[in-house]
Image: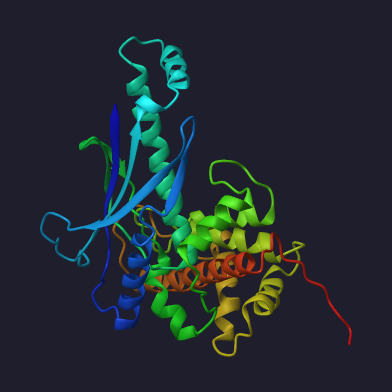
Amino acid sequence: MITIYKIIIPVHSVYEREDIHVQNYCWSALKELVDLNELFQIVIEDIGKVNLSISLGIPLGPRLINQPTFKEQLVFHITIDSSVIDMQPFEKKSIDISLDVFTPDFVMQVFVARQFNNEIQRLLVLSQLAKPGSLETLKGELMINNYSFSDFPALTSIQRKGLADIRQLNWPVYSNISFSEIFQWFDNSGLAFNTFDNSPLGKALKAFTYLFGQGSCGTSMELFFVLAGIETLYCNDKEGISNQIYEKTQVVLGPLTDFKKRLKQMYHFRSRLIHGDIELMPHGFGYSTTDDRDYFNELFKSTSLAAAILTATLQQMILSNRKKLTFEYILR
């Protein structure tokens, strides 16, 4: 029995007011991802490696008001032939469920669909470590044999909203790493998103995942987790944390020649937020004052810079094959 699994995702290809540099960057990244069609494999537990097809399709339906222009759908596709795989693990799973209606074939389909969903989420998050801010999507759909199985979560991030901000600062400077290099690095690293990892790199990578999700575009929780990731890489004691970050990030990411106050203000804003020195905005309610605008402007600038620092640091660690950052003072 042949089972076809597809994940279909509308892509944010162009936002209004984005300059041609950003448009070309995002389109080039999308094309590079599609060029991996049939050249990349994902691992499905109890089945093994399966070829991953990647293609572009034309989305259906009109553009919504105040939504970005959608020119493409990203389509991920795998095919499983149950006649050539060992069904014993799925027979055991169907027995464990203890309901006769769940046949081994049905259990296999559900099991594969969930793993397929997780693998594509992993690839999309890692893609934004390779080419930060290059890909944003709306909620998609996972289908089994052309029947809807479940929603696929949207992928948005402050990385995309902050591209112009980080370009203006000109620090840190992102590396442009190929998708295949990032995917290969992750597979060989022994890291995983579905297990606890107490190593500095593992914890920082987990913090990186908090940048992504539906509606993720600069929230206090994102700032909290991203700065936790930065601290685990750069800080070896709890005293003078902001100074450690200020000095050590410039060793790894290069000197910050302009906007130096911005780096210290980032951590100062976080400290004021955590310690209750800033009025908190109510969650889920309309609230519009001058203070509100100032708060969100400062939150955006702090989160945008923190996200860029964590991303660029992880890039440098990958390119130099480091699992942690070690600093020492040298008297010359």
Q: Residue furthest front?
A: 84
Residue at image position (17%, 58%) is 58
Left/right placement of residue 87 relative to residue 64 reads right
Q: Nearer the viewer, residue 53 or 285?
A: 53
Q: Quadrant of the C terminus?
A: bottom right
Q: Residue furthest left?
A: 62
Residue at image position (47%, 71%) is 304
Residue at image position (49%, 56%) is 221
> x and y percent of residue 63 in the render?
14, 62
> Does residue 112 show up?
yes
> Does residue 275 show up?
no
Residue at image position (59%, 71%) is 268
Quarter assignment of residue 62 = bottom left
Q: Residue furthest right?
A: 331
Quarter assignment of residue 244 = bottom right
Rendered position, 95 above or below 127: above
Q: Nearer the viewer, residue 268 or 51?
A: 51
Q: Nearer the viewer, residue 193 or 242?
A: 193
Left/right placement of residue 280 relative to residue 191 reads left
> x and y percent of residue 45 in the render?
49, 33
> x and y percent of residue 110 in the render?
35, 29
